[in-house]
Image (spheres, rainbow, N blue to C red):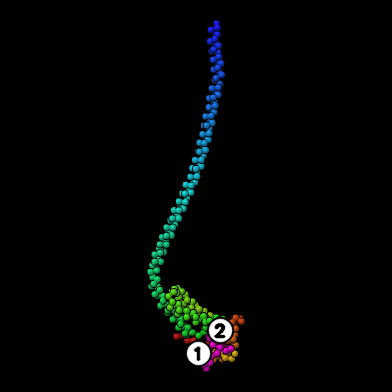
């Protein structure tokens, strides 16, 4: 009996030990499984983050691509426009080159033309009333204008355009004299050879008269004889009125002028 009982007891003890060891082994497997699951979860999270990052990068690249396409279209449009501008400028350059080729020819034609214009002005002035255009300081603007015309035509540093401008300015000034009145102090040589300081008054281009400072003697310029001739005293009031109007000390009014009949040839 004793030999039989011992093996049973041994088997029973082994069974108890096995029942105790099994939960410990299962616990270890569970821990490993949990650890593996956590690692898988973290890997999945990292993968998802990477996917999100790649998706954001893809969206940015799509937006950048669309922007580049718009810039490309705009650049193509600008290029076509600039090509038209360049073509127009090239045509303009061809035209300018042709004009520059004719500059010397034009300059050669302008010089005689301007000389003729100045000659016409001088001829007109010689036949005109010999009035002056004096400033308050006594400077004769009209005489200086004609002197400058001769001076600029002889200078090489004055452009043809500037010469032409001065000539046209002289023509315009001469035209203006016919629509204005003016007075100035001057010295005139009378018929008896005496020289007197007088007040000269210009009725546009209708008449040129003077009155002495003592207001006792009057005269007018005679176009036929090209000299001063006496003027009746009856014009004294009108001449003084004109001088006051020209000096802006009297209001504009109708004036009587010693007009003579002119004949055109």
Q: Residues within 10 Å of mark 2 (few under 14, many from 20)?
A: many
Badge 1 local density, few (<14 within 10 Å), some, or many (20+)? some
Residue at the spot of label 2: 184
Residue drawn at x 41%, y 75% is 110
Vertical relation: 239 (above or below) 5: below
Q: Which residues are magenta?
A: 184-213
**Residue 58, x across and y down, in percent:** 49, 42
Reading the image, the residue beneath label 1 is: 227
Query: In this view, which residue lies farthest toward the top?
Result: 1
Q: Residue at x 44, y 81 (%)?
A: 119
The vertical placement of 54 against 96, above or below, is above
Residue 32 point in image, percent of width and height? 53, 27
Instruction: Please state the horizontal and vertical placement of residue 206, each as a whole percent of the image.
Output: 52, 84
Q: Residue at x 44, y 58 (%)?
A: 82
Quadrant showing the C terminus: bottom left
Q: Is residue 257 visible?
A: no
Q: Earlier in the sequence, mark 1 or mark 2?
A: 2
Is there any visible trace of residue 108 in the rendered image?
Answer: yes
* Separation of marks 1 and 2 at Cα, in angstroms: 18 Å
Q: Any magenta on residue 211?
A: yes
Which is closer to the viewer, label 1 or label 2? 2
Label 1 sits on a secondary structure element that is strand
Instruction: Write the residue at 55% across / 8% down.
Output: 5
- The image quadrant where one finds the N terminus is top right
């Amino acid at each position: 009996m004793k030999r039989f009982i011992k093996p049973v007891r041994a088997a029973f003890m082994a069974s108890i030990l096995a029942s105790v060891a099994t939960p410990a082994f299962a616990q270890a497997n569970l821990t490993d499984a949990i650890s593996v699951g956590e690692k898988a979860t973290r890997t999945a999270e990292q993968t998802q983050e990477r996917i999100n990052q790649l998706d954001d990068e893809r969206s940015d690249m799509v937006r950048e691509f669309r922007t580049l396409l718009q810039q490309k279209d705009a650049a193509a449009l600008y290029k076509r426009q600039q090509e038209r501008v360049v073509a127009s400028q090239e045509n303009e350059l061809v035209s300018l080159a042709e004009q520059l080729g004719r500059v010397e020819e034009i300059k050669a034609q302008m010089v005689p033309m301007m000389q003729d214009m100045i000659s016409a002005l001088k001829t007109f002035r010689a036949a005109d009333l010999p009035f002056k255009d004096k400033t308050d300081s006594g400077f004769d603007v009209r005489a200086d204008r004609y002197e400058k015309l001769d001076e600029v035509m002889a200078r090489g540093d004055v452009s043809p355009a500037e010469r032409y401008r001065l000539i046209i300015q002289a023509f315009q000034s001469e035209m203006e004299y016919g629509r204005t009145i003016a007075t100035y102090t001057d010295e005139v040589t009378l018929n008896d050879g005496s020289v007197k300081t007088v007040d000269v008054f210009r009725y546009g281009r209708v008449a040129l008269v003077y009155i002495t400072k003592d207001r006792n003697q009057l005269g007018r310029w005679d176009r036929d004889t090209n000299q001063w001739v006496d003027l009746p005293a009856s014009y004294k009031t009108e001449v003084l009125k004109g001088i006051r109007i020209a000096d802006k000390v009297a209001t504009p009014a109708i004036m009587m002028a010693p007009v003579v009949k002119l004949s055109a040839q």
